[in-house]
Image: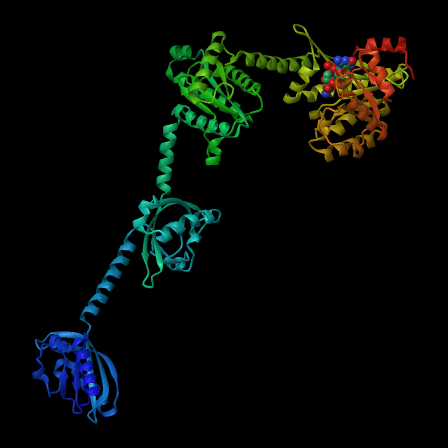
Amino acid sequence: MTIVERETSEIHALLAETTSEAAVHLDAQGKVLYVNPTFVRLFGYKGREVLNREVDKIFADRSRERFRQKIVSCLENGERSDSNLRGLTKKGEQLPVRVTVIPHRWRGDQAAMVLIRDLSEQLKITDELEALKSSYSALSETVSDPILQINESFHIIFANSAVERVFGYSAEELLKKEFSSLFPPSVHNRYDEVFKKYFVIDDIHRQASQLGNAIEVLGQNKSGDIVPLEISFGNSKSVRGERLVTCIIRDISQRKKTERKLKYLAYHDKLTDLGNRDLFYITLEQFLSHVKRYQDTIGAVLFLDLDGFKKVNDTLGHNVGDSLLCSCARRLSGCLRESDHVYRFSAELDPNSTSHEDLFRFGGDEFVILLTHLQKPTDAAVVAQKIIDTIRRPYQVKGIDPVIKINIGVSVGIALIPQNGLDAMQLIKHADMAMYKAKERGNRYMFFTSELNKQASERIFLENGIRKALDQKVFDLHYQPIVGIHGYIEGAEALLRWHDRKRGFISPLDFIPVAEETGLILPLGDWVFETACRQLRTWNSEGFEDLYVSINLSVKQFSQEHIVDKLSGIIERTAIDPKNLKIEITESSIIPDPREARMKMEELKKRHPGIRIAIDDFGTGYSSLSYLSEFPVDILKIDQSFVINMYKKGTTKIINTIITLGNSLLMDVIAEGVETKSQLEYLLSKNCKSFQGFYFGKPLTATALTQMLKTYKPPLFQV
Ligand code: C2E
Ligand code: MG
Ligand code: MG
């Protein structure tokens, strides 16, 4: 044997000795030439017990015959083979084995190398895996919650049959879907971000990162219904090393329903179903943080205490008392439902909520109201007054025979947000204090601060007063002369006058804004227009045929959809000559909807040729100049403040500009507020051609103006 041959055989021997497979070398006759130690260990035969013999006894039953055939085909045909057979140890134990027969040449003859691998361990593991798999699948099928396994590309790779109960999809259907198909499309982006976290972090590190094990989300089932879900996540890896996430999903609809019910009970008053004190504080805190953050709104806390309730309760019994409280609660929520000043937080959270998060029962006969979105403090007084009027109406209480009428009242204390505080406890304390002040006089409301009390009572006085004055026909029209370039009276502006029996003269500057806000300007404006047209007709037919009348139209009046029809009706009814009619609107009537305003003006002029339109108080609005040339405007009225303050710095420049503008656009310019000769002279020198002001005459009754027209001598004009 050469050195190389010797080394090779040593390496072979080493391999055979160390391999975990049993090795048997057979000669051309199939007799054993060599067995390795693993063979000895596996089958229990010593080397000498098998040397030079056939080894088919190490196989059991049919395996023995099959092995023989393999050896024959190897030795005769040089065929290699692999097969699973049943081995048999010396002790008689059977073993599952993998047998590989490898043909090779040995000492010039065909020989065979047989390698035998014990499969018992491997089969045991496979069996265990199988058992494990079936117990897992039994487990996942017995739990009533859906279990899903998701891979890194968010595809569902496993689903148990419980998915059908919650999602309506069968497990097979889900295997073709993406995880996102179980959620409403509107939340996909947001949820994707959340779910991704569970893929990049494993169970061990999850706690450290404070990522909860379970999350609550909204799912969507096959028929599109939203289902509240709780999902618990667990991480694992696939055989190929891919990250997998196992989700155990729980349908928590029932739990949510119970939670909501409990929450409702905790925050609502059993008798009236209104929010209770706790809910009030939560709602108020929410609103306060909004006010602090955005500073864009004001609000009010109204503290209500019924007047005369205790007596009813004591004399007619608690049942009557309870039913009276319920009636009051219903009336109060009715009042608020019609109010614009209520911001419903509940509506944001749950659009189907019917609870009143603006009205709360504090206990006994105390109620609290939270008003938000107020334009100005006196809006709170308007709501308070409405509440007082509503509660004051008599009650008919069922259950008592004969049915009797009960009268009670309510005292309301108002604290304003933020003026009276930005702290919940302080606000309620202030509202409560104001309520006590109101209670002293009974059946009224009081603000926490006295200044506001004055403003509010003025506002309520005006609102009620206008209504009454309209009913009782107390309003009157005065007419202020407007003179032309030579000083003769060419027309008159109709101006509303209100003389209250107690208060005396009330300026339109005070009551017109309230009439605007309450909508009372509409009946009032109709009356003005009709009365002024009739007066115009009288003058025109009684010798002053060229005299014109100018009538003011407020923003709200002009914005009425059918204003043109309305004015036309009056113009026709009173049979006036439209060329003697002027209509005054302000820039603020045009700004909200210039297109609409222009259409109305054009339509009016088309129907009544000759009618003229003036922009009143010109120069005080914010509008752009561009509209002037595009709108069918005939007259600019320089606001009286410019004329009166003519000698203040810069004012003459404004006057000059308006006159130049008017002249260049071929519009008439009327200067209002002309009080002195020097003002007139200046205006004349700047080419202004019409004037109105105390210098010529104050607003007068129609009779007084008729008298004036007859005797009027123009003041000296230097033309
Ligand atoms: P306006 O339309 O600009 O009316 C002119 C106002 O200036 C009138 O005030 C008038 O009395 C006052 N005035 C006239 N000449 C002078 C003067 O030389 N010096 C001073 N200091 N004031 C002068 P009035 O009557 O108090 O009316 C105030 C505003 O109320 C009117 O301003 C108009 O905007 C509104 N108004 C009056 N009557 C009506 C009406 O019937 N309908 C509508 N919508 N608004 C009206
Ligand atoms: Mg006017
Ligand atoms: Mg004016």
Q: Position of residue 386 (x, y in %)?
A: 55, 18
Q: Is residue 316 left or right of residue 126?
A: right
- Residue furthest toward the front? 3
Q: What residue is rendered at 44% in x and 52% in y?
A: 180
The quarter in which the N terminus is drawn is bottom left
The quarter in which the C terminus is drawn is top right
Q: Is residue 355 left or right of residue 90?
A: right
Q: Quadrant of residue 564?
A: top right
Of 470 and 487, which appears nearest the observer?
Answer: 487
Q: Position of residue 29 (x, y in %)?
A: 16, 91
Q: Position of residue 271 (x, y in %)?
A: 39, 23
Q: Quadrant of residue 426?
A: top left
Q: Is residue 324 visible?
A: no
Seen in the picture, residue 30 relative to 20 is either above or below; the reply is below
Q: Position of residue 487 (x, y in %)?
A: 89, 15
Q: Is residue 507 visible?
A: yes
Of 72 and 663, which appears nearest the observer?
Answer: 663
Seen in the picture, residue 565 relative to 120 is either above or below; the reply is above
- Residue furthest toward the bottom? 108
Seen in the picture, residue 255 relative to 693 is either above or below; the reply is below
Of 299 and 47, which appears nearest the observer?
Answer: 47
Seen in the picture, residue 631 relative to 671 is either above or below; the reply is below
Q: What residue is rendered at 90% in x and 14% in y?
A: 717
